[in-house]
Amino acid sequence: MHDQETTTHSAEDDPRNRDILIYVDGELKHRDEAKVSVYDSGFMLGDGMWEGLRLYNGKWAFLDDHMDRLYEACKAVALDIGLDRETLVAELERTREANGMETDVHCRLMVTRGVKVRPFQHPSLSRTGPTIVMILEHSKPVDALQKKGIRLATVPQVRGLPMSQDAKYNSHSKLNCVIACLQAEQAGADEGLMLDPHGFVNTTNACNFFIVRKGEVWTSTGDYCMNGVTRRKVIDLCRANDIPVFEKNYSLVEAYGADEAFLTGTFGAQTPVAEIDGRPIGPDGGRGPVLTRIRELYKAAVAEDTA
């Protein structure tokens, strides 16, 4: 078993999380009492959408981008959230305030199609309206994520074509990514590097993936990966600050030969990739001047957004 402290979502243990209040359909419940029905569409079928949000200085970073993505995905699968954006955000804030949370907080906001009348697939069997759950935890990435970097293993599991299960759905149906994670673990790595259906480097099972070659930042075309908020911020920041950035097809050969590599995600922001398939990335565990600059720009963007 590999070192659990180098997974991309490893957080420092915080005893305050033992008594958090969790939002379940308008009620705030102690974590030990927060439950949903075994007939819930999310539990039964993975029929739901979710967002990961991060709190800095009392404000949720890039909240509009996350709400755009959530409401767009729910519309695409005919899932009526039942609350407008302002009301949903007000409920999020009510949950935050009830927990006395101000910074270094992660929220998993989940919306499923709700409780079914019978245990079968058809969406019409979900008749009571959606289930909405918000889990807010005190959550700070462990130092090892930045110091050691992440070890990736290329896995057989791919992110598929949009007509199979579009990777742009941040859905509860995560089995594809779970299988990739298991394959990476079996290979002795921290996370799985997933290819696209044509064999080009795509994403990992939990984060978006970037490399740096000769001062240029490369990431996948975006056709087969999650439309990550942090991914988009990094691309936009590069373009605004004269850092060459390309969304393009590239192969493992070019990833192995990268000078720097990193992952992006709401939880870890930018996390260096120290090795891919046992091959070290660059001379300093995936870190380098370009990643350092991007991290500075992103930190400033978060500070501006949450000021």
Image (cartoon, rainbow, N blue to C red):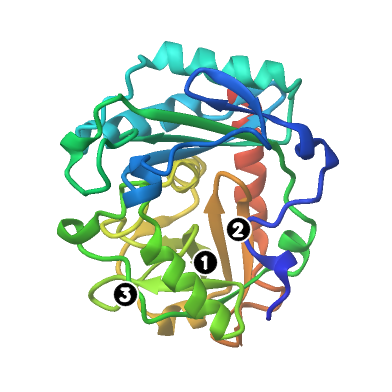
Residue 22 appears in view: yes
Which kind of residue does numbered mark 3 sit on? Answer: Phe
| Contact check, label 1 and label 2, Cβ < 8 Å | yes
Q: Secondary structure at mark 2?
A: helix
Give yes or no for contact between labels 2 and 3 (Cβ–Cβ under 8 Å): no
- Residue type at mark 1 is Val
- Marks 1 and 2 sit apart, C-alpha to C-alpha, by 7 Å
Residue 91 image offset from top left, x and y in percent = 53, 16
- Residue 1 on image: x %, y %: 68, 81
- Does label 2 or label 3 sit earlier along the sequence? 3
- Is residue 294 shown above or below 71? below
**Is any part of residue 227 visible from this angle?**
no
Pointer 2 local density, CA inside 10 Å: few below 14, some 14–19, many at least 20? many
Q: Nearer the viewer, residue 156 or 117?
A: 117
- Residue sitting at x 73%, y 60%: 146
For the residue pair 246 and 77, the one nearer the viewer reads as 77
Label 1, on which residue? 212
Q: Label 2, on which residue?
A: 290
Distance of mark 3 from mark 1, alpha carbons?
A: 16 Å
Depicted 164 relative to depicted 55: above or below: below
Between 24 and 162, which is closer to the camera in this rendering?
A: 24
Regarding mark 1 in the picture, which secondary structure is present there?
Answer: strand
The residue that mark 3 highlights is: 200
Residue 224 position by quadrant: bottom left
